[in-house]
Image: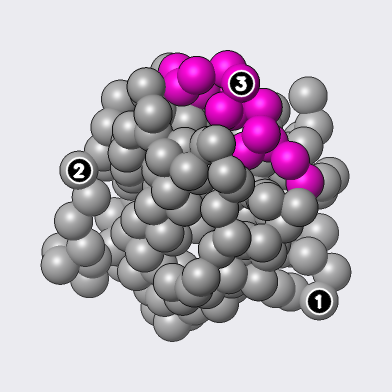
Amino acid sequence: MKKLICTIGILLVTFTVSAIDSDISNEDFISLAHSSIKADSITFCTFEDIRFAQHNNEEGNSVFFIISSDFSKPVGYEGFTNVGISLDETGKVLSVKILSSEDTPSFVKRVKRKWFLNQFIGYSEKKNIKMITGATKTCKAVKISIEESVEKFMPVIEFINQKNDFNKKKISLTKKLNPL
């Protein structure tokens, strides 16, 4: 299997993320990435406060996994809902999953509906998402969280896709991990 390399370099000086402390440990992040990407192995990467997982599939295309709480924490009706997001190498959403929530449980239950979350698949730019009556604020917060996370992570994908000489860039941490 090809050795996977993830890096973020000095070229991302213009990329600013106000990272938010996440309740999800790196070990849990890795487990979530494995279940989301459904790959034999992933590469777990961090750059300063940005963490993500990457997998190159058999065709050589990258799949990324991020969690929204590392980028954005909009509040719904009563609290924040954390979302796991898988992206392809163009930044299009492959899958989303509600990981945890501080919002009203009955609203979160509605937002977890498959038809609502599936609206984000193929999502690459802001688009009209059908909200759920009775859970509109929670839906909007989830939508904003996904939008902001993807937008803030796009420079990372763009940099990796440039196939720069990664050895000349600063790497904080790269680990190849097999399933737990």
Mark 2 or 1: in front is: 2
Residue at 45% x, 18% y is 102
What amino acid is labelled 3 in the image?
Answer: Ser
Residue that mark 3 sits on: 106
Residue 147 at what x, y percent from top left?
A: 42, 59
The residue indicated by pointer 2 is 18
Few, some or many residues within 10 Å of mark 2 (<14, 14–19, 20+) = few
Spatial CA distance of label 3 from label 1 is: 42 Å
Amino acid under disc 2: Ser
Picture layout, residue 75 above or below residue 157:
above
Judging by the rendered image, the residue that carries numbered circle 1 is: 59
Which badge, 2 or 1, is on the more N-terminal residue?
2
User: What residue is rendered at 74% in x and 40% in y?
Assistant: 113
**Quadrant housing residue 49:** top left
In the rendered structure, the answer to whether residue 169 lies left or right of residue 25 reads left
| Colour setting | one colour
Calculate the distance from the C-alpha at mark 2 to the C-alpha at mark 1: 34 Å
Measured as percent of width and height from the top left, residue 159 is found at 38, 73
- 88 is higher (above) or lower (below) than 4: below
